[in-house]
Image: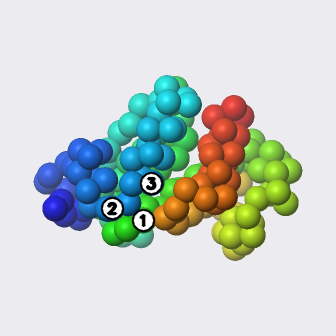
């Protein structure tokens, strides 16, 4: 088992999956890579707010989302900037109440909201995340 806090040992995507122990993680990564032909980059964050290894899924230098491994689930961070905001707010009423609550409770700073969405199942929230990533990719 990997130590997600040990910056000396970079885990592989498969090791992250073993750490999370939830098949939705590898499904999610595969789907995003397939849809957007994006690159994965495993990075260590020394930030006191979210210290440890994470996975960035990038396309053309733009981070589509950052994934933080947890035990049995993972957190997807999606930045909604000024350019994406009107598109996200257009679809928000059709999204799950959970995503709506996350969006409204996330404070805006410098014209951005950093949405932290815990994902455990392939459910409606999973689909909401795909919609947000689609907006992020196309704006």
Instruction: Please give the label number shown on residue 107.
Output: none
Q: Name the residue: 70% across, 40% down.
A: 135
Q: Is mark 2 on a helix, strand or loop?
A: helix
Residue at the extreme left: 8
Residue 34, placed above or below residue 113? above
Q: Which of marks 1 and 3 is in front?
A: 3
Closer to the chain start, of discs 2 and 1, is 2
In screen coordinates, is 46 left or right of 23? left
10 Å neighbourhood of mark 1: few (<14), some, or many (≥20)? many
The quadrant of the image that shows the N terminus is bottom left
Q: Is mark 3 on a helix, strand or loop?
A: helix
Residue designated by label 2: 20
The answer to whether 106 is drawn above or below residue 42 in the figure is below
* Image x and y of residue 94, in percent: 82, 57
Identify which residue is drawn at 44% across, 45% down: 27
Q: Label 3, on which residue?
A: 24
The image shows residue 84 at horizontal and vertical percentages of 74, 44
Circles 3 and 2, Cβ within 8 Å, touching? The answer is no
Left/right of residue 129 with respect to residue 26 in the rendered view: right
Task: Work out whether residue 101 or residue 125 is closer to the camera in this orientation and state it.
Answer: 125
Q: Which of 138 and 1 is in front in this view?
A: 1
- Are the residues tagged 2 and 1 within 8 Å (C-beta)? yes
Q: How is the image coloured?
A: rainbow
Could you tell me residue 46's position as x and y percent?
31, 60
Say which residue label 1 marks: 73
Say above or below: 117 vs 41.
Answer: below
């Amino acid at each position: 088992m990997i130590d997600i806090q040990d910056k000396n040992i970079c885990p592989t995507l498969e090791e992250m999956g073993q750490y999370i122990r939830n098949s939705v993680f590898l499904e999610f990564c595969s789907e995003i890579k397939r849809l957007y032909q994006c690159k994965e980059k495993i990075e260590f964050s020394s930030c006191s707010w979210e210290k440890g290894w994470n996975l960035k899924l990038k396309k053309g230098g733009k981070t589509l989302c950052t994934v933080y491994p947890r035990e049995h689930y993972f957190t997807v961070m999606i930045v909604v900037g000024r350019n994406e905001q009107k598109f996200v707010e257009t679809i928000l009423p059709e999204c799950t109440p959970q995503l709506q609550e996350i969006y409204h409770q996330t404070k805006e700073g410098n014209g951005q909201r950093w949405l932290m969405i815990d994902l455990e199942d392939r459910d409606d929230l999973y689909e909401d995340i795909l919609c947000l990533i689609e907006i992020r990719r196309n704006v």
